Image: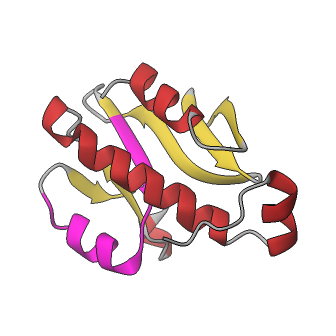
Amino acid sequence: MDHNGFNQFCRSFPATTYVVQWGNSHVWKVGGKVFAIGTQSKSGEPAFTFKTSDINFEFLRVSEGYIPAPYFANRGMKWIQQVETSGPLDEDLKYYLSESYRIVALGLSQRKQKELGIQNLNP
């Protein structure tokens, strides 16, 4: 996936906002809270960062193509960065971005969820 595909996918979630910040990163938020970041890896390739559940974090941190997200993970946060962005991992990335959106949105107050029209996010 490239940054265009990433932005198109993140845009499909309800009540999202997009900003470019932190050194030209593509940052997606729901209710003012970050759920996904598109940036470049040290090698200059696209890299995508997202929040995960505890179980997914433990699985992905040792999986090929993923690393604990710089800055986030070393502060104890459960964020992963996908650094292998070739086609075979695109569907996985879509799943993890969807989960990140859901996790972050569920962390919003019920009032904020209702205001944004995003209630009933549990599977």
| Quarter holding residue 108 | bottom right
Which segment did they paint magenta? 47-63
Q: Residue 105: where, in percent of width, then height?
A: 65, 62
Going by the image, does 30 lie left or right of 24? right
Going by the image, does 120 lie left or right of 12? right
Q: Residue 36: where, in percent of width, then height?
A: 52, 47
Between 70 and 65, which is closer to the camera in this rendering? 65
In the rendered image, the quadrant that contains the N terminus is top left
| Quarter holding residue 33 | bottom right
Residue found at x 17% / y 49%: 65
| Magenta stretch: includes residue 51 | yes
Residue found at x 50% / y 26%: 8
Residue 27 in the image: above or below residue 114: above
| Magenta stretch: includes residue 17 | no
Going by the image, does 30 lie left or right of 2? right
Going by the image, does 95 lie left or right of 26? left
| Quarter holding residue 27 | top right
> Is any part of residue 71 visible from this angle?
no
Residue 61 in the image: above or below residue 1: below
Between 74 and 117, which is closer to the camera in this rendering? 117
Between 16 and 78, which is closer to the camera in this rendering? 16
